[in-house]
Amino acid sequence: MLKRLGLVVMTLALVAALVSGAPAQQSLTWTAGAVGGGWYTISGGMAELLREKAGLNVKVIPGGGTQNPLLVEKGDAELGMGLPPLLGAAYRGEDPYPGQKMEKLRALAGNMSLNTFHFYVAADSPFAKMTMEEIFKSKKPMRLAISKPGSSDVWVFEKIMEFYGYCQPGKAADCYKTWEAAGTKFFRGSYSEQAGAFKDRNVDGTFTFLALPGASITEASVGRELKILAFPKPLLEYLGKFGMGEGVIPPGTYPKAVNGNEPVVSATMGTTITVSSAMSNDLAYNITKALNDNADRVRKIHGSLADYDPSKGYLFLGVALHPGAEKYYREKGWLK
């Protein structure tokens, strides 16, 4: 009886030791974009891939291009979607982060998911007969949906108002006051909320930043006819100073738009997956490897990733590669 009891005790002790020694699934937070946007969808798909291939439990939270560097720098999120111009500005402590050098920021992969700015208006509104330049220069009163503060959409929107003389650089609050004084009213919400406000005729237009095709824009165009306005050349040249490029919304991207069969010139920016230098080299390497070794899966997560080439994932990042990611690209022979 004593021998049997002793055997049970030893067995339980062994089981307890094995359980306590088993590695727990590591939990990470990934700050993405607004719900309903491309970044949120992409981050969710990549999180699932990391769970399967790297054994990581990744929670995706809403974020934005402007606020994500802050969250990663402070350690409130281990991974974040970022835009090269904003990441570079955050690292150097420049506008829109004056005096806030975020020198922990590093990158795992980039040169992916080109995001495009959209300025669309109701097809049955007087704004559909105007160019983007005419609307901004005239300061014609309108009800305009924009994203919430902390998003890259808003940062670029403020740059556009600065370009048209609404305020001095760095004085964004004055820009809004200038147009509001002329009678314009702003609605701030997520991408899905913007689409809802447009369909319900609570706004005349929307300024937003999404990977093609933007789900919320498709949704808005189904509920109400819209027209996407082209970015004028002088504005594109100005935005180019902040790291934005010139792109085209191809015909057929939004078939329900009244000009959906025409190419529309716009401003674009690519995406970088950013982390902190505090992340271990092994973890950074494993995440980079899991994503890039399964590039075929990654390309199917969202239409904007269809052309992602992992051999160029170390380019156009905005900040330096994390050493763990650098190890991966060198092992593959892509980074010499």
Image (spheres, rainbow, N blue to C red):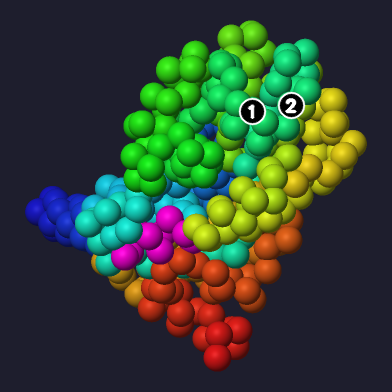
The reply to whether callout 1 and callout 2 are in contact (CB within 8 Å) is: yes
Please count the marks in the image: 2
- Quarter of the figure with residue 336: bottom right
Q: Which mark is residue 105?
A: none
- Residue 78 lies, in percent from the top left, at 34, 55
- The residue lying at 38 percent from left, 78 percent from top is 323
Mark toward the start of the polypeptide (1 vs 2):
2
Please tell me which residue is depicted at 84% across the width and 44% down the height of the picture: 263
69 vs 292: above or below = above
In front of the other: 130 or 115: 130
Residue position for label 1: 135
From this viewpoint, which residue is outermost toward the right? 261
Kindly identify the amino acid type of the residue bearing the numbered disc 2.
Met
Asked if residue 119 lies left or right of residue 150, the reply is: right
Above or below 136: residue 304? below
Q: CA distance from mark 1 to mark 2?
A: 6 Å
- The span shown in magenta is 84-92
On the question of residue 101 being in view, the answer is yes
Q: Residues within 10 Å of mark 1 (few under 14, many from 20)?
A: some
Most extreme residue toward the bottom, as rendered? 336
Question: Mark 1 falls on what kind of element?
Answer: helix
Point out the residue furthest to the left here: 2
